[in-house]
Image (cartoon, rainbow, N blue to C red):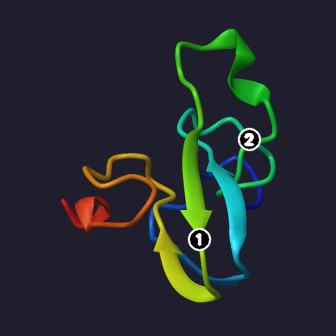
Amino acid sequence: MTGNSPTISPIVLDLDPGTYWWCKCGKSKKQPFCDGSHTSTEFTPERLVLTEKQTVALCLCKKTSSPPFCDGSHNK
């Protein structure tokens, strides 16, 4: 994300196996991943565990009903 305008379409990433923390609060400067900025909010990051390399579409609008994955909610 750049500037002050939120990005609402998903970000598609090729991720290696591992544990990732998806930002729920929208304040992280490392979107779509958590950087700890949620500490002043009621939000906590969503854990994402991958056991193999995958291409994923992660939500940036934070309105998805299937976090951390995009479900098209940004189109509504």
Q: How many marks?
A: 2
Residue 28 disc label:
2
Q: Residue furthest front?
A: 51
- In the image, 64: left or right of 43? left
68 vs 16, nearest the viewer: 16
- Tell me the mark number nearer the camera, choosing from 2 and 1: 1
Q: Position of residue 34 (x, y in %)?
A: 72, 43
Which quadrant is the N terminus positioned in?
bottom right
- In the image, 48: left or right of 4? left
Residue 30 disc label:
none
Quarter where residue 27 is shown = top right
Q: Amino acid at mark 2?
A: Ser
Few, some or many residues within 10 Å of mark 1 (<14, 14–19, 20+):
few
Few, some or many residues within 10 Å of mark 2 (<14, 14–19, 20+):
some
* Mark 2 to mark 1 CA distance (whole Å): 21 Å
Mark 1: secondary structure: strand
Q: Amino acid at mark 1?
A: Leu
Residue pictured at 68% horizontal, 24% vertical = 38
In the picture shown, does residue 13 fall above or below 29?
A: below
Tags 2 and 1 touching, CB below 8 Å: no
Which quadrant is the C terminus positioned in?
bottom left
47 vs 60, nearest the viewer: 47
Q: Position of residue 46 (x, y in %)?
A: 53, 42
Residue pictured at 24% horizontal, 67% vertical = 75
Mark 2: secondary structure: loop
Residue denoted by label 1: 50
Q: Position of residue 70 (x, y in %)?
A: 37, 67
Residue pictured at 55% horizontal, 88% vertical = 55
Q: Position of residue 2 (x, y in %)?
A: 76, 60
Q: Earlier in the sequence, mark 2 or mark 1?
A: 2
